[in-house]
Amino acid sequence: MSYISKTNLTVRYSETDKMGIVHHSRYYPWFEISRGDFIKSFGISYNQMENDGIYMPLTETGAKYIEGVGYDEEVVITCKMVKLTVVRCEFYYEVLRASDLKLVTTGRTAHAFCDTSMKPINLKKKYPQYYEIFEKLVCGEE
Amino acid sequence: MSYISKTNLTVRYSETDKMGIVHHSRYYPWFEISRGDFIKSFGISYNQMENDGIYMPLTETGAKYIEGVGYDEEVVITCKMVKLTVVRCEFYYEVLRASDLKLVTTGRTAHAFCDTSMKPINLKKKYPQYYEIFEKLVCGEE
Amino acid sequence: MSYISKTNLTVRYSETDKMGIVHHSRYYPWFEISRGDFIKSFGISYNQMENDGIYMPLTETGAKYIEGVGYDEEVVITCKMVKLTVVRCEFYYEVLRASDLKLVTTGRTAHAFCDTSMKPINLKKKYPQYYEIFEKLVCGEE
Amino acid sequence: MSYISKTNLTVRYSETDKMGIVHHSRYYPWFEISRGDFIKSFGISYNQMENDGIYMPLTETGAKYIEGVGYDEEVVITCKMVKLTVVRCEFYYEVLRASDLKLVTTGRTAHAFCDTSMKPINLKKKYPQYYEIFEKLVCGEE
């Protein structure tokens, strides 16, 4: 199965900078929201995972910027899981302008599975119930 | 004794918004830095306080905006402690443009003394060593 | 007429700090979103106002913090206009936790009416159409 | 000539998240500060460039996270220009913990040269004085 989540957001005034468009760094919190929605679609939540002792610290982030978006514009963010091993996973994102579905930005984040003291864990061994859900969600590379 | 701390900062691009000046919300992290420098001047640090089990959550914040400042402008932030009781304290801040010392913004924050589970504590009873330092630093109202 | 807008938000991971709850400064962008929604309810938008040459820079902000809220919690933000003169206006906000409608934070912002060069303007004289809408929306003090 | 700039920063409380360390998105504003310092070392400033009508919007950003850093820790950020053509350039960054010079994060940003209406320009043709400075600063790939 290949699942893609969709999240709608409206650009906040505080997310713009003096260039008049969304500051490049503020796409990363959007990816994070989108990733949270992706996970939530399957009856689990990232908050619950942290409470259960699983952290997913970021090991890599990246974004390509195609268009700028301005204050009060609505965007749609899609997220899919593009890689999964027992110790790490990767997500891919697209930000589209809602009005014309023009591609604005793409992104990618890589994560390690860690315990509460930020030591790497084997998710399949320690939390097979989570790993099984992720295994169903992951799709091939875009 | 009445002590006033001084902190120099340069406006970050990411702190501006589409109006071309620093977003009003971004003065509060500046006050926080200034407050940290105030505390640090006396050989203690807010980080150390948190490690010792003392939190100072904010109960009130406020700011008045007189002038805007733009990207790459240098500002000076002053901080003083204007109130102290055994359960709470208040700080007052001024942000000045470094080039001409024109007053840009004033601010005020109120804090409770709490333990790690965010329960209010009597600082004088539980941590007399910190209370004594604060007692020396507090000054009358501006 | 006394109008109150309602805005629903979910706490972003990036809005929390090491205390585990939403950083005090991040309520101000929430107030801003809520204010935008308030204005939008009447068929105008703050974006349109800026395009028409009206800016509403902040002259004062303030907040009182009653409870903390954590990652992924849903909040409701209400906004009303509590003061209006021909040169300035004020808004009042309440942030409630959605699950139990417990009051989390209250806020207040004051704004000047300015032109594109940030010079104060008399809104009633220069833009009577906007002033008339605002006049219908303003309510007495809370 | 191969020039590397150095910028010292102290982690702000507001830059941490509930994991207790700097949020991954907040390294990008640090890279931006570091890039500004890089440019400033040569008697020009990014602010001056924007006033002269040259914008450098980001086309790509990326970071790798090796270690976390916490509140009040001091870091050193190095920046160098690793690519330059007449229409674009790239920078590479390293964030080191100041206390032990341990590598915390590396980053990379790509920029287009644009005019005030965000149309691409040939920097060498339109602003040879800036291009010449950049040409002196660029170094080979790290």
Image (spheres, coloured by chain):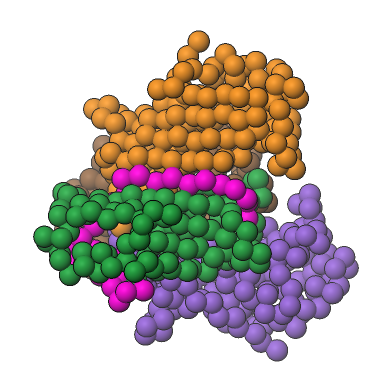
Chain colours: A brown, B green, C orange, D purple
Residue pictured at 53% horizontal, 19% vertical? C138
Rendering coords of residue C133 (x, y %):
62, 16
Quadrant assignment, res C36? top right
Residue at the farthest left position: B125
Q: Is residue A17 visible to us here?
A: no
Please check the rendered image and state whether residue B42 is part of the magenta-colored stretch, yes or no. Answer: yes
Question: Left or right: B13 with respect to A8?
Answer: right
Residue pictured at 15% horizontal, 64% vertical? B127
Question: Is D104 drawn above or below residue A96 in the view shown?
Answer: below
Which residues make up the magenta segment? B41-69
Quadrant of image for the C terminus of chain B? bottom left
Rendering coords of residue D122 (x, y %):
83, 64
Rendering coords of residue B129 (x, y %):
17, 70
Which of these two is toward me, D78 or C129? C129
Which of these two is toward me, C36 or B54? B54
Residue at the farthest top position: C1
Question: Is A133 drawn above or below residue D135 in the view shown?
Answer: above
Residue pictured at 65% horizontal, 25% vertical? C86
Please check the rendered image and state whether residue B28 is part of the magenta-colored stretch, yes or no. Answer: no
Residue pictured at 23% horizontal, 45% vertical? A48
Which of these two is toward me, B65 or B3? B3
Question: Left or right: A13 with respect to C97?
Answer: right
Quadrant of image for the N terminus of chain B? bottom left
Residue at the farthest right position: D125
Rendering coords of residue C88 (x, y %):
61, 30
Which of these two is toward me, A43 or B43? B43
Question: Left or right: C72 with respect to B65?
Answer: left
Q: Is residue B8 visible to us here?
A: yes
